Amino acid sequence: MDRAEPPQSDGSSVAVLEYLRTLQCLVEAQRDVMLSYLSDRSGALPVADLGVVEPTNGSVEAGDRAWANGNGRDAIHSMPTPAADAVTSPIDVVPDDPPAPPAPDPPVTPTIPATTRRFVLEAETLAPALPVASLTGQNALVISDLWEGLDELCRRLTQAGAAVEVMATPRGARRRALPEHVATRLSAADVVVHLGAADIVSPVDAREVFATLQSAVTGRATTIVAAVAAHQDPDSTVVSGVGGLMRSIARELPDRHVRVVEVPPTLPSKVLARLLADEVLDPAGPASIRYRNGLRTTRRVTRGMPLREVPALPLNDGSVVVVTGGARGITARATIALARETGCRLELLGRTPLAVDEDPRIAAATHRTALRRALVETGEVANPPDVEAACDRILAGREVRSTLAALRDLGVSATYHPVDVRDADALGLVLAGIRARHGRIDAVIHGAGVVDDRLASDKTADRFHWVFATKVDAARTLLDHLDGDTRLVVFFGSVSGVFGNRGQVDYSAANDALDQLAVRLDGAHGRRIVSIDWGPWAGTGMVSPELEREYGRRGVGLIDPDDGVRALLAEMATLPGEPAQVVVMRAEPEALEGRPRTAPGTFATAGAAVHLDEHDPEQDAEHIERAGHPVSLEDVTEPG
Ligand SMILES: NC(=O)c1ccc[n+]([C@@H]2O[C@H](COP(=O)([O-])OP(=O)(O)OC[C@H]3O[C@@H](n4cnc5c(N)ncnc54)[C@H](OP(=O)(O)O)[C@@H]3O)[C@@H](O)[C@H]2O)c1
């Protein structure tokens, strides 16, 4: 049968059709890979390169919604292929009467909770590590600067059979590539232990640790362990985010022993050396271990409670609230609700310039598809990446203007500052200007964030820095510029930092660092600081019914924006001393954990769960013995 001729059209229509056809093919290919991956979570890690265009707009919203899949929109080009069909081994001896194979379990569809709930984190006590692994024939590389416990750690790893080498902590690796000989040593090591974030004097953060460990991730290492020590100054804004980084690496490399070990800064070095060696030599158990008050613990998201009614907020129409990222996305939703509730004066920060008038042909295109067509028809942009970038810019500008219009309609004062919050000087100037104008800053909501999802093996140090700095460097600048009048700070975090997530080493690290900041600084100077780790929100149609069904299959529901806003306002009304880190999601924690959950207390050796906010460094060394690690007197009296 003859194929029908396409209708005759002018050149621009042909260009539009060609463009749309290319785009449709890409979207269909992406969707197929995503769906096949989602339908087989046991899939191995090999990456399908679909040659998708570079992301032009790292939308956090899309990434977080996709996070339950272990993939974000921008990561699709690095998605795993579905596992190859299982290959069965030949059977040498067939029993006379082989038992019938058990019928496979029917697939269990987890139930999505009907409502969004608020969870807190608690420490679950674990049994001591069992250093059972043999490292015979393996190369171990310990990355550390001068540290008194180094000899002891190396001795223990050598005793386990490894050939041990020590390497000074690479610094500046996030700015320039590791020297080739260093990268080669890392890729050739079977065991890598990174102690740079536990350095008391000059710790490195997740950016540096990642830039170093990436060679181990792509290399042959079967064991990758990083140590972290909390900063000793309770007012310090130095945070590493290495916990989030390692939890995500563990999610990407489920067949390897990947672990982060958080230790008290005061622990005697010999004790620390032994604990670390034990953690290297015990691959069983969770990816996150924390020694605290003498106990070996891991973190659990627990005590899901219904969202509370919003009590009276400590803000009114005289208050000044600074909101980074407040003109777009879920933070804009929250900003409008806050204005409605309190009438406060708002200062919104974002990169998007307040655009001038749009070309009438562009202005008439009200949604992305029409916008693409209109852009191609103008002839100013043609290739898909440029068209997408232009769409992103135009839609972002419209979103900002629409948020400001909504605030104007509410009759509140709202000022928009186009500023990149990663630029500490520029952000400092904006904050100084706000203070000069209003004489006060009562509260800050830090909602700015970006995602750039791709597997750790495909990340570049620059892009990692972009994601990390947007959240963490900006949070530190904000905190550094606040005076005593600011009584409330809220960070928008993510479940990705809590549980780790494939494709999000940088984003998990950044959100984990925000959590660390909140937990450390909440209550200091009478200021309430809380980090809210959100699960994915439902939005304005960006989650297709198809994807929503896939989330549903994993038991992760989307947060209704009204619930999200209610949760935020309720948190803003809490006082210092309430948990500084909360998780708000419409899912059971098991749906987001990378391993089956054991019954609470299964591993318990002593005592009940301990709140993570509690900290008594003086007890740390003393109590190690109670946790089942007999410590000699010599060990505990040695200065740490
Ligand atoms: N949506 C979710 O489901 C979800 C779930 C968990 C956590 N979160 C968190 O909630 C926050 C908002 O997410 P979203 O989904 O609403 O994302 P979004 O729509 O992409 O909004 C991100 C916001 O951050 C601003 N921003 C990004 N980089 C910036 C920079 N360098 N300087 C100044 N502003 C910057 C953006 O404004 P410009 O583009 O104008 O700069 C925008 O307002 C993020 O912190 C995210 O981690 C969201």
Image (cartoon, rainbow, N blue to C red):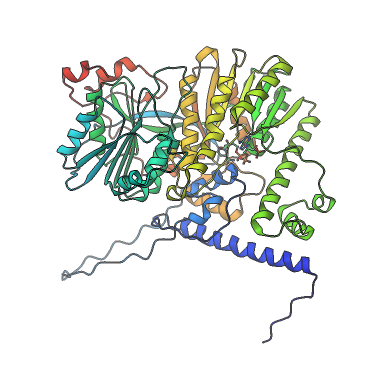
Looking at the image, residue 521 lies above or below residue 586: above
How far across and down, in percent of the image, does residue 228 sit?
36, 30
Above or below: residue 593 compared with residue 274:
below
379, above or below 269, in the image: below
- On the image, the x and y values in percent for residue 224 come to 32, 42
| Left or right: 491, with 337 as reference point | left
The outermost residue toward the bottom is 1
Query: Residue at horizontal 38%, vertical 43%?
Result: 179
Q: Quarter of the picture for ligand 1?
A: top right
> Residue sitting at 82 percent across and 52 percent down?
364
In this picture, is 380 found above or below 295? Answer: below
Residue lying furthest right: 360
Q: List x then y, in percent, for residue 474.
A: 57, 29
Q: Is residue 359 left or right of residue 281?
A: right
One can see residue 496 in this view = no
Which residue is rendered at x = 31% and y = 21% of the image? 293
Q: Quadrant of the N terminus?
A: bottom right
- Seen from the viewer's position, the closer of residues 470 and 538 is 470
Image quadrant of residue 128?
A: top left
Residue at the image position 69 percent from the left and 55 percent from the top:
387
Residue 335 placement (x, y as % from top left): 68, 30
Q: Is residue 407 visible?
A: yes
Q: In the picture provided, is 631 more to the left or to the right than 592?
A: left
**Which quadrant is home to the C terminus?**
top left
Numbered label tally? 0
Quadrant of the image occupied by residue 414 = top right
Front-lying residue, 404 or 475: 475
